[in-house]
Amino acid sequence: MAGGVPISSPAMFTFLANAAKTSGWSWLFAGLFVSFFTVAGHAVCYVVFRQFGPFVWNKIVKRYPGILKTVSRVSSRLSSAKSKPFDPALLLLRWIGVGYSQVFWVLGLSGFDASGTLRILFLADILWASVWSFSLTKLLADAPLIGRYLTGFGWALLLLSLAGYALRHFFGQKTG
């Protein structure tokens, strides 16, 4: 997910809760498992965009010219917040989900040292994964019937996400 794989959080955590139940994992282990890979994915994205930023940035701007305005706004917020390494709006994105992974891309592209912000965002990832893991594993343990429906719902979300991504890519190739 952190690298842009089109799977929704509810689908991922439904599969995780089901795996935790069948494997006998505790919700805490499941949460830490997802936290590790989420943080690792976000860290890799930040490093890749920081390292290859100029090359990637030129490609992105050519393909999506409107992104300049958004990135410049985020970059100016980051540069004006040197004394304060954390912006609460970034934490809010963790719980809303829309654009959260892209924050790491923009942080890398900005060229600023974002280590203070990254530490806080990585802690938010751990808390986020733990809350989802606890909620869904508890729900699956207490209401097995709901668990069966959630697993089906997770598969449906995954398949719809992949189909939507494929269609978008297919139609993007035809028109581009």
Image: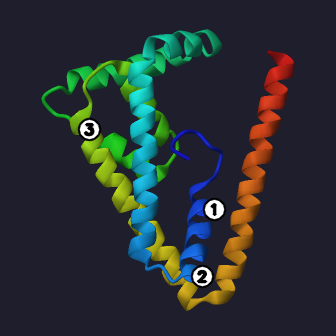
Q: Amino acid at mark 3?
A: Thr
Please tell me whether mark 1 sits on a helix, a strand or a loop. Answer: helix
Which one is in front, 7 or 80?
Answer: 7
* Whole-number angstrom distance, CA of label 3 to CA of label 2: 37 Å
Q: Nearer the viewer, mark 3 or mark 2?
A: 2
Number of residues whose C-alpha sits closer than 10 Å to that of mark 3, classed few (under 14), some (14–19) or many (20 or more): some
Q: Residue at x 57, y 16 (%)?
A: 60
- Quarter of the image for residue 143 reads bottom right
Q: Residue at x 74, y 63 (%)?
A: 155
Chain-order first, disc 3 or disc 2: 2
Say whether residue 103 is left or right of residue 111.
right
Residue furthest left in the image: 83
Chain-order first, disc 2 or disc 1: 1
Q: Residue at x 72, y 77 (%)?
A: 149
Mark drawn on residue 22? 2
Mark drawn on residue 117? 3
Instruction: Answer above or below: position of 132 versus 126.
Output: below
Residue furthest front in the image: 23
Please tell me whether mark 2 sits on a helix, a strand or a loop. Answer: helix
Percent across and percent down for residue 78 are: 28, 25
Q: Which residue carries the number 1 mark?
A: 11
Number of residues whose C-alpha sits closer than 10 Å to that of mark 1, classed few (under 14), some (14–19) or many (20 or more): many
Query: How many numbered callouts?
Result: 3
